[in-house]
Image: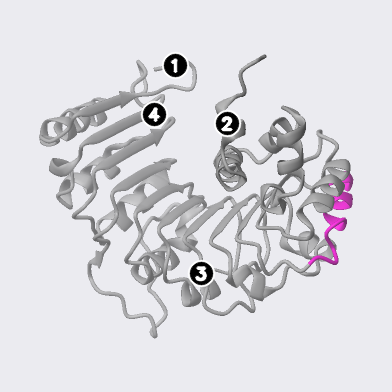
Amino acid sequence: MPQQSLLHTLPLEIILAIFELVVSGNQDFVLILAQVCQGWRQAAVSTPILWSTLTLVRRNKPVEKAKLWRSRNHGLLRGLHIWRDSSNIRAALAVFNDVALDPLRSLSVFCMTHQTLCSVLPQLTPRVISNLDYLDLRSSRGPWFTGTSELRLRSLSCIQSESDWGTLEDHCTDLRHLTFWGYGYEQGPDMLWLLHRNPKLESFSLEYRSSESTVSLPPLPTPRMLPSCIELHNLTKLSICGDCNGNQTAATLLHRLSLPSLRSLELNCFDWSVSPVIEALIDIGVVSRLATITLSDDIHSMGILSSTDAKLLAKLLRNAVTLNCLHLASQDVPS
């Protein structure tokens, strides 16, 4: 008589808790769990929370997937991730056009405007946006925050996505993780104010690509009285990337920050001088506390660094007296 697997002897509550951990990294794993055996299939199919996060990619039959997920999550949608606007993606979203989205806590949108998304998902109201914990916008323009009340956001990623910064800054005060990639000159004052309003920030990733020839930050509107130094006591991880002018803007911003807990630094660079950012990091006194430094892409490639850059990088490393990990990464050559 074959010996029964130990997993089959566990209470159903324990099995479902394990299932939740398995699908937390990739919700599509629920399909694999449902094919292992009849018992697992019954447990997976009858547990709506395992189907509560939906990722839609246009090449993977999104309409059929949306119908399956809706039949099994019974209208419970806690996570929605959309990759590129297309007719079949819109048709898939329309499957949920009458579903209340109040439980939604995680939203990722890639290459779809706010107007388009709201036209196929009318239940995506400002109140729903206000209650999100995680929002990832990539090449997705629109007034995402207009009409929102106090935002609950803990993680915000805004990558090449124009939005209504003023509303965001006024209502977002509890961020832990912030990523911004875009054209930086115009957003310089807005970014300073957003950082000032979120003192609990733990990680900050910044890529500025500026089309402006000048890099000085315009004055803030008079109601926004910023301190000369913005204290971010909880920030432990910083990542910076940019082109020449964007790099200068990032350096100007860094000079306004106090980062006493910074331990991890990533310079993610291509064909621009790293000198202004390195000088700013040395000036504000954070280098001596760094435990990890990552130099990514081509910053360490032969012929990219100027002599000034090389000298400053050497100075950066000499000052990093608590450094225990130096990571050199490249897109072309695995580290």
Disc with the residue nearer the chain's start (4 vs 1): 4
The three-letter amino acid code for the residue at tag 2 is: Leu
Horizontal side of 198 relative to 61 (left or right) equals: left
Name which of mark 1 and mark 2 comes first in the sequence: 2
- Say which label, 3 or 4, has the lower sequence index: 3
Residue at the disc numbered 4: 296
From what the image shows, is residue 41 above or below residue 110?
A: above
Tell me if residue 305 can be seen.
Answer: no
Residue where numbered disc 1 is placed:
334
Is residue 32 depicted above or below 239 in this figure?
A: above
The answer to which of marks 3 and 2 sits earlier in the sequence is 2
Rendered location of residue 220, percent (x, y): 39, 75
Q: Nearer the viewer, mark 3 or mark 1?
A: 3
Residue 59 coordinates in the image, percent (x, y): 81, 33
Q: Amino acid at mark 1?
A: Pro
Residue on which the image places disc 2: 7
